[in-house]
Amino acid sequence: QVQLVESGGGLVQAGGSLRLSCAASGRTFSRYAMGWFRQAPGKEREFVAGISRSGVITNYADSAKGRFTISRDNAKNTVYLQMNSLKPEDTAVYYCAAAAGVVGTSKPELYDYWGQGTQVTVSS
């Protein structure tokens, strides 16, 4: 079993940056592809970015391309989401998730473990 704990959320002005972290428990972190999702009030959870087990392959939602970067450090059991040029529409609770697969899929139903989420609020 994998436990995930997100951190790094907060309040930032539009155009600013935040780096989210997701720390995983256990010694099997490198066996899991990882993903970041977000959910705004009244909206469905949506995919943001995914990363393969090795970290070589990444994929992004169109809304994140060019602004967000997902990375991982398997030695530290941590996955990151660097978010730049933030917009008010990026406001949401951000979740990390682990999937027993090779590549970070965009389908939330394929993820096995989820963190509790961290709030990101972007003011205009």
Image (spheres, rainbow, N blue to C red):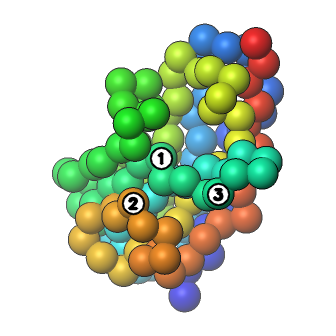
Q: Residue furthest left?
A: 56
> Please, what is the three-letter code of the amino acid marked with disc 1?
Val
> Please, what is the three-letter code of the amino acid marked with disc 3?
Glu
Q: Nearer the viewer, mark 1 or mark 3?
A: 3
Residue 52 percent across, percent down from the top left = 28, 61
Check the image and report above or below for 15 versus 93. above
Q: Which residue has dot 3 on it?
A: 44
Mark 1–mark 3 Cα distance, whole angstroms, equals 12 Å
Residue sitting at 63 percent across and 32 percent down? 90
Q: Is residue 38 left or right of residue 124?
A: left
Foreground of the two, 39 or 119: 39
Which of the two discs, 2 and 3, labels the residue nearer the N terminus? 3
Residue 87 percent across, percent down from the top left = 62, 21
Q: Is residue 49 left or right of residue 7?
A: left
Foreground of the two, 25 or 96: 96
Is residue 51 visible in the rendered structure shown here? yes
Foreground of the two, 6 or 87: 87
Q: Which residue has dot 2 on it?
A: 106
* Badge 1: residue crowd in 10 Å (few <14, some 14–19, many ≥20): many
Check the image and report above or below for 10 versus 123. below
- Checking the image for residue 119, the label placed there is none
Q: Which residue has dot 1 on it?
A: 48
Residue sitting at 61 percent across and 50 percent down? 38
Total number of numbered labels? 3
Residue 14 percent across, percent down from the top left = 67, 14
Q: Is residue 124 left or right of residue 111?
A: right
> In the picture, residue 45 is in which quadrant?
bottom right
Residue sitting at 65 percent across and 66 percent down? 115
